[in-house]
Amino acid sequence: MRPAAVHAVPATTRVAEALRGVFGSLFSAQIFLIVKSVFVDLLFQKRIFDKSSLRWLAHTLIFTGFILLLLMHAMHSVVTEHLFKGYQSTLNPYLFLRNIFGVMVLAGVAIAAFRRITLKPQRLRTYASDWAALVFLGVIILSGMLLEGAKISSPSKFQSMVDEYASLSSEEDGKALEAFWVQENGLISANVPLPPAPELVAKGREINGDSCIECHASNKAAFASFTVAKITPLFFTVLGDAATVTLFWYLHIVACLAFLAWLPFSKMFHILAAPVSLIVKSITGDRLQEPANILTRQMIGLSACTHCGTCSLECSSNMFYESFQNDFILPSEKVQYLKKIAAGKETDPAILKRMQQGLYVCTSCDRCTTVCPSGINLKELFVSSRYALLGQGMPETVMLSHFSFPLALAQNFVDDHLQALKKVTDIFKKSFQHLTDMALPISLGKAKDIGNTTFRGCFSCQRCTNICPVVRSYDNPAEALGMLPHQIMFSLGIGNSDLAMGAQMIWSCSTCYLCQEHCPNQVELCDIFYTLKNGALNKIEAGANS
Amino acid sequence: MKYAFFQGCNIPIRIQQYATSTTAVFAKFAIELEVIPEFNCCGYPVRNVDEKAYILPSIRNLAIAEKKGLDILVICNCCFASLQKAKNVMSKNRPLMAELNAILAKEGLNYSGTAEVKHYLTVLYEEVGPEKIKAQRVNAFTGLNISVIQGCHVLRPREITHFDDSFVPRITEELLHTTGAKSLDWQGKLECCGAALAGINNDLSHTLLKEKITGAQAAGADFITPICAYCHLQFDTTQKNILLEDSGERLLPVLLFPQLLGLCLGIDELTLGIATNSTIAPEDIQRLKSLLGPPVEEKKKKKVKVAA
C-alpha cells in the first residue's frame, strides 16, 4: 500500500529529488538551520526536554553514556588513542570514566523501565521489542562490568600481567605485591591469607609504585566493576577464574554484536533515522515543496519512530480509544502498524478494517505531530494512509461523524473523500426501508422505546419542519431528505424505527436544535436524530460483521 | 480568579488567535486562564456514532478540572455544549457515572460533578460586567456594523446549555454594545453555519454558510463575529475555499469578539492576532482602526440623543 498522492512517482525521480533537496540545503543558507538543529534537536534533544524532564534525563543518560562508551571504549584504537597521548585503558581517567558512562546508561534504562510501568494506565503501550531494547542495553553494560569485575578478581589475570609487565627481583616481592592487590585492588588469591599482613601490604605498595602504577591505576577507580567484582568468586568456584573471564568476554561481545545485528530491524534504527527526520523538519517545517519527496519523508518517519508513546499520551482521541477499544486509535500504534503495512506484511481485512477506523477516529488536532520527539510528520502519514485505505473499498461508517469536518476544511483528497463517502451512503440506501418504496397502506405498530420517548408528545403541528433550515434549503425537501422531521416523529409513533433510521433527513440534520427548541410539546427531535444515527450505524456495523 | 482554559482541538492548531486574544482580554480583568495540557477532545466529533463515547471524554476533562480545583472556561460552543451535556447526563444517570468513573479510575481520576463549566461570554457578562468593561476601555468604535452569529450549541437546547434566553439572547448583545459597535439585526444571527455537515454533506453545508454570508452582507455588516470555533472556521476558512470556486464575490471579513473588545481595551492588534484571520485584508484593519476613538465622546453623544 502506498499513499495515494505519491503513488505515481517512480523511484528514480524520488531518489533524484531527495538528493537535490539534500544538496540544495547543504549548499545554501539552510546549512545554519541544520547546524542549529544538530545542537538543539540532536545533541540536546530539546523536543524531549520540553515534554518531560524525566524522559529527557533517561534518554540523555543512555544517549551520552552509550555514545561515549562506543567512541572511547569500543572504538578506542580508532578514537581515543589518537585523541589522547599516552592512553591506556587501565589508567585514569579512562578507567573511572568507563564506569561513570556505564552507570549512566544503567540509570537511564532504569528510569525508562520505570516510565513504561507507571505510565501504563495513561495508555502507554509497551511491546516485547520495547523491553528487548532496554534489556539489550542493560545486558551490554552489565556484562561489561562483570567482565571488568572478573578481571579485577582473577588471580590468573593478575599473574599474567605480573609476568608481562612487572620485573620483580624476588619471589618475596611477588608475594608482597599480591598481598597489596588483595588488600587494595580486589584481587582474590588463595596464596594470600586474609587479612594480609600489614607489613607485606606496605612493601607491596612500594613495589606497586615502582612496577605497576605507571600503567595501571587503582581498581577502585573502576567503582562499578569493583563493586560487581564481589560476586565473581561464586563463578570462580564453579568455572575457575580464567573461564569466568572468558565467559563474560563472550557474553559482552555477543551482546554487542547481536545488538548491532538487531539494530536495523528494530526501533533502535531511530539512531540513524531520527536525526534525518529532525533535520528535515527543521528545514521544511513539515511543508515539503516537492511532492516526489513525500514518500521518502514518510519512510524516514516510519523508521524514526521509537514507540516512545509520547503521541499516544497526548492524543486528544484517547477517550475514544477507551470507548472503542481499538488500539489503532492511538497514534503510536498506528505507526507501528503502518510499518508492517508498508513492508507489505499485513493483508488481514479484519485488522485493516480496525486500522481504517483508528485512522478515522482522529480529531485532527495535530498534537501527535507537534510533540513527536523524532519530528515525524504523523499528521501527513495518517491523512494519506487514511485515504489510501478508504480507497481500497471498505466502507467506513465513522466518515459520517464530525471527524470529517477538519478534513473537509483542509481540502486534501477531496475526490477520494467523496468516493469513500458514497460507499457509506449506498449502504444506507440498501439497508433501510424508504417511505417511497413502501406499499400502502402503512401498517400501524406499537411505538418502540428507542431510548428517548419524547416523540410520543408530537401532536403534528409541523412546527419542526417549518423552522428547519435544512428543509428550507431544498426545492423539493421530501424528495431530497426522504422524510421531513415531523414525519420521522410520526414513523416512530407507529413503531417503525427502521423507516426513521433510513431517512436521509437524519444525516442532513445540521444539529442546530431549532426544531427541538421550538417544539411546543417538548419533543426532543435533534436528540432523537442522534439516537437514530447511532442506531443506524450500529445496525450497519452489526450487518457487516455478521 | 483563575479558570482551567478549555480550548478544544481546533483552537490550538487552527485558531490560536482566539485563545491569545481571550487570554489578553481576561488578563485586563485579572482573570487568569490556565492551559491544561492533559485535556482531551470534548467528545463532540463522535456524537453521530455513539452517545456514550461522546459523554466519556467530557467526563474526563471535568474530572481533571475537579482534581485541580478549577472551573472550566470554554471558548468553543460545541465543546461548551458537550461539557454541559455530559454534566447533565451524569446528574440523571448514576449507573453510567459509575461505569465511566471506573474507566477514569485507571489513571487516578474521579468525576463527582463539582467543577463548573462556563462560557467565556458568561464570565465576561456576569463576573466582570458591562460597567466594569466600559470603565476599562481606552477606545470605542463608532459606525462599526457587526453581524454576530451566536452559534447553535451555546443557545440550544436551553435546558442543557443554561447560557442565555435561547430566543432573544442578550448577553452577547450587551457585551458587544460596550465596544460601541452596532450589532445588526439579521436573519442568520441564531442559525446554523453548516459546520456540522462539512465532510458529510458538503453541498448542504455550503448552502447554509452562503445563506449566512449573503444575509450578513445584505444587512450591511462590516464584519461577522462568530462566537463558536466551528462557525469561525466556516467563515474564515470554508468561505475562502468556496469563494475560490465561484470567484468574484466579496469576502465577508471575520472578527472575533475578544479581538473587537481587545482593541477597545488598548491591547495591540498583534497580540489579538487580527491579521491571522485569513479573511481580513490590511484595508479592513485600517478601516477598523479608523473607526476607533476615545470612548468619552460616545457617551456624550448618547446623552445628546437622550436629551433630544
Image (spheres, coloured by chain):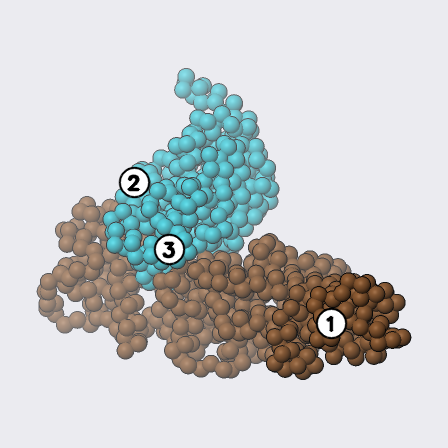
**Could you tell me how far apart the alpha carbons at marks 3 and 1 are, in whole angstroms?**
62 Å
Query: Front-most of B6 and B236?
Result: B6
**Could you tell me how far apart the alpha carbons at marks 1 and 2 are, in whole angstroms?**
99 Å
**Can residue A229 be spotted in the picture?**
yes
Is A304 rendered above or below residue B300? below
Q: Which mark is residue A79?
A: none
Q: Position of residue A69 (x, y in %)?
A: 71, 68
Count numbered badges in the picture: 3
Residues at discs 1 and 2 both on one chain = no
**Can residue B151 be spotted in the picture?**
no
Q: Chain of mark 3?
A: B
Q: Which mark is residue B105?
A: 3
Categorize mark 2 by other alpha carbons within 10 Å: few (<14), some (14-19), many (20+). Answer: few
Q: Position of residue A523 (x, y in %)?
A: 20, 51
Q: What colour is chain B? A: cyan
Q: What colour is chain A? A: brown
At horizontal 19% and vertical 57% (from top left) the residue drawn is: A489
The residue wearing badge 1 is: A192
Three-letter code for the amino acid on which mark 2 is drawn: Phe
At horizontal 33% and vertical 38% (from top left) the residue drawn is: B164
At horizontal 70% and vertical 81% (from top left) the residue drawn is: A242
At horizontal 51% and vertical 53% (from top left) the residue drawn is: B14
Query: Front-most of A184 and A13?
Result: A184
Q: Which mark is residue B167?
A: 2
Three-letter code for the amino acid on which mark 3 is drawn: Ala
